[in-house]
């Protein structure tokens, strides 16, 4: 992985096994399978493993010889089909498409055509006779027309059909869609559990990257990548010396990337700026940094040179800009603009 790739919500993994903090939750949920609704909304912060949880629940629903605790056995024909990515009764809907050359193209939204295909699939008879399960990740990426098309299926799904919607930001899902789902907040690990898991995954500076990820362990695992950390350090070292910061030179690092990588890199840069300015505000108010603990001395050195109200306004402007990053824009120019704004805070 390089710092120019898509934002690290979760590190790439094979077919995911339940994470340690999800096992008890999944067992309790599957114990009430007989009363499950046809549509569930699994939500929570990015990087805590919601997709992993939803896929594990789907696998258990399709297992033909489930264990006593309701979890998938891993050896029956249904489980083998799932592990091979070939189960005819499982659909995974995500915002990407495969081109004619086999290349995967990430999309900003899940298009209505994909949901129409899903609706047609829902009407088919189950091949294996256990259930039919569709997992939509992230549900807030549904195009407005796709969300509207899904409404009737959520209202009147065929018997034995389960729709699992996964959301990082459930408030962005239309209320008409949310109201037809049972909300299921995904379990989150406590810091000790997250640190233990990251250490077991081979992360050497687990506390630092977990802080960078806001306590989200799967995001932290992706952020532990050496190239990611190297690029982050370049940006944060520049932010630590605002008087010497060159917006043109720093933004040029984005322009040097391939065209299909620039938007993602701008998103990373905005995330770093957002976390940095939030920590700077905390330090200025007498607190300690939360995300950038490894740059605590640099933040402490800046806190006396920035006025709180302009810093707050600038931080708010970054949040607005981050919300627009998926739309067509010139990444280098946006980066230059926000960096000029940052430098102006210290004039």
Image (tube, rainbow, N blue to C red):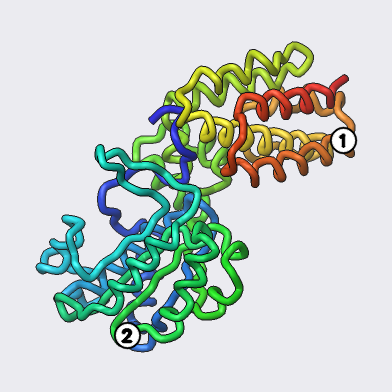
Above or below, 149 relative to 224? below
Counting from the top left corner in percent of width and height, residue 10 is at 42, 46
Under circle 1, the secondary element is helix
On the image, the x and y values in percent for residue 30 come to: 33, 77
Q: Of residues 190 and 67, which is closer to you in this image?
A: 67
Q: Earlier in the sequence, mark 2 or mark 1?
A: 2
For the N terminus, the quadrant is top left
Q: What is the quadrant of residue 314 in the picture?
A: top right
Task: Give the total number of marks visible in the rendering.
Answer: 2
SS at mark 2 in the image: loop
Q: Residue at x 36, y 65 (%)?
A: 135
Q: CA distance from mark 2 to mark 1?
A: 55 Å
- Residue 3: percent from the left, percent from the top? 47, 28
Q: Nearer the viewer, residue 175 or 276?
A: 175
**Where residue 233 sits: x, y (%)?**
57, 22
Residue at 22% x, 73% y is 62
Q: Please name whichever residue, 139 or 296, is drawn nearer the observer in this view of the structure.
A: 139
Residue 261 is at least partly visible in this image: yes
Q: Is residue 112 above or below residue 36?
A: above
Residue 25 placement: quadrant: bottom left
**Position of 314 relative to 151 (above/below):** above
Q: Read off the residue under disc 1.
A: 310
Viewer-nearest of labels 2 and 1? Answer: 2
Quadrant into which the C terminus falls: top right
Q: Nearer the viewer, residue 113 or 293?
A: 113
Looking at the image, residue 328 sits to the left or right of residue 306; the answer is left
User: In this rendering, would 118 be left or right of 76?
Assistant: right
Q: Residue 158: which disc? A: 2
Q: Residue at horizontal 57%, vertical 66%?
A: 173
């Amino acid at each position: 992985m390089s710092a120019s790739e898509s934002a690290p919500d979760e590190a790439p993994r094979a077919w995911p096994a339940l994470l340690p903090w999800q096992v008890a939750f999944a067992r309790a949920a599957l114990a009430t399978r007989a009363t499950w609704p046809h549509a569930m909304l699994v939500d929570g912060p990015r990087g805590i493993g919601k997709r992993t949880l939803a896929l594990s629940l789907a696998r258990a629903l399709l297992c033909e010889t489930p264990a006593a605790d309701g979890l998938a056995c891993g050896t029956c024909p249904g489980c083998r089909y799932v592990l091979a990515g070939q189960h005819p009764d499982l659909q995974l809907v995500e915002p990407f498409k495969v081109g004619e050359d086999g290349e995967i193209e990430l999309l900003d939204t899940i298009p209505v055509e994909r949901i129409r295909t899903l609706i047609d699939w829902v009407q088919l008879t189950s091949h294996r006779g256990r259930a039919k399960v569709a997992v939509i990740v992230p549900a807030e990426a549904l195009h407005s027309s796709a969300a509207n098309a899904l409404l009737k299926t959520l209202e009147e799904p065929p018997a034995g059909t389960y729709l699992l919607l996964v959301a990082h930001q459930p408030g962005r899902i239309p209320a008409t869609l949310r109201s037809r789902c049972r909300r299921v907040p995904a379990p989150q690990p406590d810091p000790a559990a997250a640190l233990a898991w990251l250490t077991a995954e081979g992360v050497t500076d687990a506390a630092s990257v977990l802080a960078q990820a806001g306590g989200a362990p799967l995001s932290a695992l992706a952020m532990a990548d050496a190239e990611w950390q190297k690029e982050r350090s370049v940006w944060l070292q520049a932010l630590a010396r605002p008087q010497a910061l060159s917006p043109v030179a720093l933004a040029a690092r984005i322009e040097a990337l391939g065209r299909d990588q620039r938007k993602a890199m701008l998103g990373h840069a905005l995330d770093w700026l957002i976390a940095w300015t939030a920590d700077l505000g905390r330090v200025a108010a007498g607190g300690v940094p939360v995300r950038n603990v490894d740059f605590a001395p640099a933040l402490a050195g800046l806190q006396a040179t920035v006025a709180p109200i302009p810093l707050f306004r600038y931080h708010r402007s970054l949040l607005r800009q981050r919300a627009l990053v998926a739309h067509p824009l010139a990444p280098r120019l946006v980066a230059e603009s926000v960096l000029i704004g940052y430098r102006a805070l210290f004039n």
